[in-house]
Amino acid sequence: MIRSIADAAKATGVPASTLRYYDREGLLPDVERLNGGSRVFSDDDLSWIRVIEHLKRAGLTIKEIRRYTDLVQQGNETLSARRDLIHERRQAVEAELARVQRTLDFITYKCWFYDEAVRLGSEEAVHDLPDSAVPPAMLAIRQQCLAPAGE
């Protein structure tokens, strides 16, 4: 099915201005144009736009996505290069996910801490709780949060 840029924007959730930008940046090499210059998008183009959006969310820059697009256009001889690029990005996303998980753990601990402080009437009462009175999951985070720097 052939779609106008407005229809492609609606189908993908990507603004038309962004689709024009992707096209100018060489990320949409197979998008056809009508005689008047209007872009028309096929189902394959829409699928590719979704790939671009996933790559962006994974943290690839436009330059990196352009490189990936070029590699795809070159065919099977670039499979190893594409695999390497995606594996590198996976490692970066996993590292970011671990960082975010540590932040979530800290926030979870602080939620527990303040819930307990309100229940007990003071922060000091929570600080004075023996380890045996702290839920195991919170204890591990508490120990990480209270550990001296460098440990």
Image: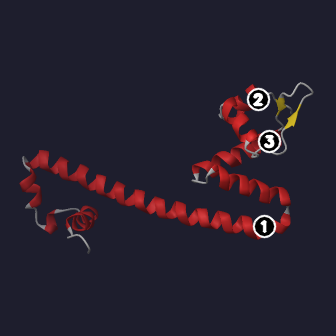
Specify the amino acid type for callout 3: Asp
Question: In terms of secondary structure, where does tag 3 sit?
Answer: helix
Q: What percent of the width, then of the height, locates residue 7?
A: 75, 27
Label 2, residues with CA under 10 Å away: few <14, some 14-19, many ≥20? some
Residue that label 2 marks: 5
Q: Is residue 88 left or right of residue 104?
A: right
- The reply to whether dot 3 and dot 1 touch (C-beta < 8 Å) is no
Q: Is residue 57 left or right of residue 113?
A: right
Q: What percent of the width, then of the height, locates residue 141?
A: 27, 64
Specify the amino acid type for callout 2: Ile
Label 3, residues with CA under 10 Å away: few <14, some 14-19, many ≥20? some
In this view, 78 is above or below 23: below
Q: Which mark is residue 148?
A: none
Q: Is residue 99 left or right of residue 146?
A: right
Label 1, residues with CA under 10 Å away: few <14, some 14-19, many ≥20? few
Q: Is residue 66 left or right of residue 122?
A: right
Q: CA distance from mark 3 to mark 1?
A: 20 Å
Residue that label 1 marks: 79
Q: What percent of the width, then of the height, locates residue 8?
A: 75, 32
Mark closest to the chain's N terminus, 1 or 2: 2
Specify the amino acid type for callout 1: Leu
Residue that label 3 marks: 45
Q: What percent of the width, then of the height, locates residue 98?
A: 44, 63
In which quadrant of the rendered view does residue 41 lie?
top right
